[in-house]
Structure formats: C-alpha cells, structure tokens
Amino acid sequence: MDVSIVGACGSIGRQAAVSLIESRVLQPSIRLQLVECRGGPSERALLGFAADLQDAYAETIPEIDAVLDPEDLLGDIIIIAAGATVPCDPHKDLPRRLLAEANRPLFQTYAKVISEYGHGEEIVLVVSNPVELGVAIFARHHPRSRVIGMGGYLDTLRFRCEIANELGIRRQNVQGLVLGEHGAAMVPCWSTVSAFGFDSKDGRDRLKSLRRSGDPSPTDALDEIRHIMIDRGAEAAFARLNQYGADLRTYVKPFAAQISGAKTPLGTAEMIVRLVETIMSGNQTLAAAQIALEGEFLGIHGVTGVPVVLSNRGVERVEPLQLWSEEADAVVAAAAAAQVAIGEFIR
Amino acid sequence: MKRWALCAEFGVTNRPGTLARVARVFSDRGINLGDILAVVGGDMLTMPEGETPVIVLTFHCSERMQQFLCRRLERMPEVSRVTILARADDDDRPIWELLPELGQGKN
C-alpha cells in the first residue's frame, strides 16, 4: 500500500513522514508521497525535505515522490495533515469557525481529487481540523467507511496516557475511549476505563477517585491556561493544568503544548504511525474515531467520535458499547452541535 | 471486471528492481497478472538499436482501477509511457501479438 501525506512540510506531516520511515512501517518497496500545494508556502521546501529524507534514511527509505499537483495523489492511505491550525502564539486565537473556513477549500479540493482520480478503496485519515468538517466533506465524495477522523484516536491515546500517569503505570496497561467531538465537546468515557492490576475493589475505587468534580469547563480551562501562559509563563501554565483531572488534561494539555510553541507533532505522528501500521498489517483494532454515521451508534446521523473497529478496509464496524447515560447524552449532544457547525459550511 | 493489456515503456532511468516494482503496483491492489512479457534491465543489451524496453501485462479489473494503475505507473521515474488496450473476452491472441496494437510496431 502506498501512503500519501498531504501537508508533508507542516510540523505534523513532516514528523509523520520521519516516524513512518524510522519505524520501518513503510518497506523500501512502498511509495511515500509527500504532497504540498503548488504556489503554497511549502512548495520550495518540499523537494528539499525529500532530499533530506534521502540523506538521512538512504538504507531503508521507501520510494519518495514529491507531489505538487492534487491530481497526482496516488496513495492507498491518504493522510490529510495540511491547512491552518491553532496559532502557536498564546496572544492569538483562531476560533473553530474560522479554522473551518480556512480549511474547507483544502478538504474539498482533495475530496474531489480522490473521487475523480482514485481507485475508490483509499483510506483517508483526517488529521487537519476541524476533524468533523473534514470527515463530513470527504465522506460526501468517498465511501464513508473509508474516511477516518484521527481526533478520537489521538484523544483516546492521550486520555489513557493521563490516567496511566496518575496510576503510575504505562499507557499500554490502561484502556478507555474518548468519544464525541475532537474539541471542547469531547467525551472522555469513564465507563470504558479499566487498567491492568486495578480489577479488585480497591483498584476500582482508585480508578473511581480519578474522576474529579469541580474542574472548570473545557472552554474555561483553555482560557485560564492561555492567560496564565501569557501572564506567568509556560511553567505556571503547565503546573496549573497538572492540577486538572485526567479527562480535562486530555483536552487542555495538547492546547498548552501548541501555544507553548512546541506544538504536538511527536504525539500526533506517533499515533498516525500506529494506525497506519494497523492498516498495513491487516490487523484489526478497537479505537475511537470520527466517522460519518447513519444511525449506527446511538441513532446519530452525522459526524462524531464513536467506538469503531478499524482494519485495512477502513471502518470494519461500529462497536456497540454500553455507555453511561450521561456519556451517551453528551455524545449525542456533541454530534448534534457538530452537525449544526458542519451545516454552515456544506449544504 | 474487464480484460486489459497494458504496455509500459521505459526511459533511460531504468534501474534494478523495475519489474518487481511494477508487479507490486498490481499485487498491492489484489490484481492478478495474467501474461507478462518483459524486456527490461540487462536485456536492453541484446535489444536492437532504437528499440525501447517494455513490459506488457494482461490483467482483469474495473475501468476505474485500470485508470488508476496507469497513472500510478506513469508516476514511476523509470516509466516514459503507458498505453492500454481493452481486450474482448474471446481475444485469445498471445501477448506478443498485442504489441503492434499497443503502438510498439514490432513484428
């Protein structure tokens, strides 16, 4: 399977390319397309980046193909990591609506290209935000089971990481899913959380104790961290966010990393690698992902994060998990809100 | 599913592993190759002057997939041209007899 990274010179795309090569997920016979936009700010850098990759990984590198025209997109797995993102400067803000406005043309361009020139079985991994809008647009032009929003996958791994940190264990020993929106309306589902070694009554009590009450709302927490970052610096901001519960940290920490200037290329790229590896190996994995639903989960029609089994056919099936009622309500509400937001941009 | 014969012509950038890379383009997408006629790599040494090394393949797939495969092969740096010939189900001619129709002009 060939892989295309749209936005290969951006911080996420660049790191994804490096991680895919370093991890040897891409065999030398595979073609890795590095895609940028002709006339865009990264056009000049693209060939240089391709040359640098050749220098760095000549022994194991797959076939590199630098692409500047959307019509030359040929990947079987297409990673959409281009476009505008949340600014790194805490003084600047880019509301979700403006982010959607900025990235909609990009989503539409590549969705149409895949529809017109693709073979029809490509798997599209949407990393660019808003993930829900991206998934909605791609799913209008391509089989919806082959369009996967990475937001839920990233949030889930972050949530498991935060829980693991509090328990003093490794992430691989923690299970749990984050559903709903890849944003303020994300729904960390404590009903899905379990951890190896925490099955006893004491263990379950310990897990239960991680669920905090009294934390600010996600939006308020974001504002608080932004202001602390501006007024007192990154150290104070990270100290404050570490006082939040694991579920709120799941949402706020990547934002803090972004506005600190470090951004989140490593974590995001690593998760892209894991998903690509699962797809290429032919294995199946239970994950959370934003997909276009037609009533398969809680009767939702629209795009939101739900539990799915992923494979080299994309979404194998939606997993019918039994959530707590407040979680189910939150997922339904997130989907409804996303649908309204998406409706402003596609009709 | 239609029957196709495809001819890929190679330029001066021909290099080791070309045949394997071409075959992988098909196998990765679950397409079984029928006949293969290949004149590439070292065999260029025995080719008459002025001739272009080629690979001719036959296979079954949808028209959409066939168009994708042509684009994919044309994107390979070694490939200078790809031509395609739709074959009727009762067309049982051997692969080398297809070459004139694929624009090679060989006898």
Image (spheres, grey):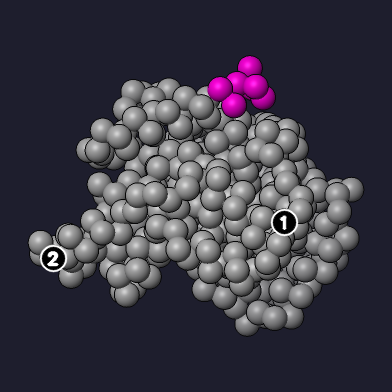
Query: Which residue is situated farthest in the top direction here?
Result: A347
- Sequence-wise, the earlier of marks 2 and 1 is 1
**In the depicted structure, whether residue B57 falls above or below residue A300:** below
Query: A44 or A130: which is nearer to us?
Result: A130
Q: Is residue A344 covered in magenta?
A: yes
User: In the displayed structure, does residue B6 sit left or right of residue B104?
Assistant: left
SS category of the residue bearing label 2: helix
Disc 1: host chain: A
Q: Dot 2 corresponds to which residue?
A: A202
Query: B58 or A218: which is nearer to us?
Result: A218
Q: Give the residue displayed 70% in from the left and 81% down from the top.
A: A56
Looking at the rendered structure, the kind of residue marked 1 is Pro
Query: Tags 2 and 1 in contact by the CB under 8 Å rule?
Result: no
Query: Which residue is situated farthest in the left direction here?
Result: A201
Q: Is residue A60 covered in magenta?
A: no
User: In the displayed structure, does residue A326 sit left or right of residue B94?
Assistant: left
User: In the displayed structure, does residue A180 sit left or right of residue A58?
Assistant: left
Q: Dot 1 corresponds to which residue?
A: A90
**In the depicted structure, whether residue A96 falls above or below residue A202:** above
Res B23 seen here: no
Disc 2: host chain: A
Start-end of magenta stretch: A340-347
- Percent x, y of residue B99: 69, 46
Res A59 seen here: yes
Query: A294 or B44: which is nearer to us?
Result: A294
**In the depicted structure, whether residue A245 falls above or below residue B68:** below
User: In the displayed structure, does residue A241 sit left or right of residue A112?
Assistant: left
